[in-house]
Each structure stands twice: as structure tokens, then as C-alpha cells.
């Protein structure tokens, strides 16, 4: 695999299941069995009730664009502007920091609330990144 030009995350024990699932092209989030709710980012206990009974559950990979910014200057080496940084509100509840892809990065093409779905970028042998693109249903 060609060397990936952008920085990649270093999984921690808390986030390893998330990245393992990404590698399988599945979006999996921690779920508190006491609150009956997902949360993110991954922690060893629920941030709402401090319960340690956490499960990992696969999510739909669907959501809505909560907010975004079109980046015209690269923040780090390896990024080619313009590109879109985004926060996605997942159907399951939590919000994810990500990039919006699969759309020309121009203000007239992107709106808050637009339906989005996960797509995968296999960055390295170990890390697959979850990005989001506009859902087909929104076109
Ligand atoms: Zn909880």
C-alpha cells in the first residue's frame, strides 16, 4: 500500500474496538446498557451515568451534517485544499468529527442537515478512516 500522506490516528485501548470495526468497514460505537444510548468518543465508562457496562454495537453509518467548514488552507501536510471538515450527527445520537467527501467543496453544494452516509478510506494496513458523503436520497 502506498504510504499515506496525511496523519493517522494512534488507537488507544479505549478506541481500539472502534478502529478494528472501521477496518471491517463497520461503524461501531460504544453503547451504555444502563442509559440505552450510544456515546462517542469511546471511553471505558458511560459519560452520562458512569456505568462500566459498555457494549460495542454496529451503527447504520447514516446521519445528517451537523456543521461544516470548507478549508481553503491546509492545516497539516498532506491535505490538498479545498476540503471539508465536518461534524456529523449520527442517526444513533452521537456526533463524529470527520471529513465530507464525494461533493465539490463549494458552499452552494453543502448545507447543514443534509443526509450523509459513511464511506471508508483505507489509509494504512492498520487504519481505515470513516468519512461521510451526501446520501443518494438527498440528490
Ligand atoms: Zn449510561
Image (cartoon, rainbow, N blue to C red):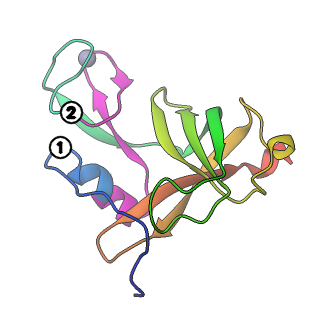
Q: Please provide the residue range marked out in magenta.
A: 20-42
Q: Residue at x 78, y 41 (%)?
A: 110
| Side of 132 where 135 appears, left or right | right
Q: Residue at x 87, y 42 (%)?
A: 108
For label 2, count other residues whose C-alpha is less than 10 Å away and answer few (under 14), some (14-19) or many (20+).
Answer: some
Q: Residue at x 72, y 30 (%)?
A: 112
Which residue appears farthest toward the top when viewing the image? 49
| Side of 53 where 110 appears, left or right | right
For label 1, count other residues whose C-alpha is less than 10 Å away and answer few (under 14), some (14-19) or many (20+).
Answer: few
The residue identified by callout 2 is 43
Query: Which image quadrant for residue 29?
Result: top left
Q: Gap between marks 1 and 2, in whole Å?
A: 6 Å
Instruction: Tell whether label 2 touches label 1 (CB within 8 Å).
Output: yes
Residue 102 pos. (x, y %): 71, 60
In the rendered picture of this protein, how many numbered marks are placed on residues? 2
From this view, report whether residue 92 is shown above or below residue 15.
above
Residue 96 pos. (x, y %): 47, 38
The residue identified by callout 1 is 14
Q: Report if the beta carbon of the residue with label 2 is closer than 8 angstroms to ligand 1.
A: no
Residue 14 pos. (x, y %): 17, 43
Q: Residue at x 73, y 48 (%)?
A: 135
Which residue appears farthest toward the bottom when viewing the image? 1
Between disc 1 and disc 2, whose residue precedes? 1
Q: Nearer the viewer, residue 9 or 35?
A: 9
Q: Quadrant of ligand 1?
A: top left
Residue 104 pos. (x, y %): 78, 57
Amino acid at each position: 500500500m502506498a504510504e499515506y500522506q496525511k496523519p493517522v490516528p494512534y488507537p488507544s485501548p479505549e478506541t481500539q474496538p472502534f478502529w478494528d470495526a472501521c477496518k471491517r468497514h463497520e461503524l461501531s460505537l460504544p453503547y451504555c446498557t444502563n442509559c440505552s444510548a450510544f456515546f462517542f468518543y469511546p471511553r471505558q465508562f458511560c459519560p452520562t451515568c458512569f456505568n462500566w457496562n459498555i457494549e460495542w454495537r454496529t451503527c447504520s453509518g447514516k446521519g445528517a451534517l451537523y456543521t461544516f467548514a470548507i478549508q481553503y488552507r491546509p492545516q497539516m501536510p498532506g491535505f490538498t485544499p479545498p476540503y471539508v471538515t465536518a461534524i456529523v450527527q449520527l442517526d444513533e445520537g452521537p456526533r463524529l468529527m470527520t471529513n465530507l467527501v464525494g461533493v465539490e467543496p463549494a458552499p452552494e453544494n453543502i448545507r447543514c442537515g443534509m443526509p450523509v452516509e459513511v464511506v471508508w478510506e483505507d489509509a494504512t494496513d492498520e487504519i481505515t478512516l470513516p468519512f461521510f458523503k451526501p446520501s443518494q436520497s438527498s440528490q
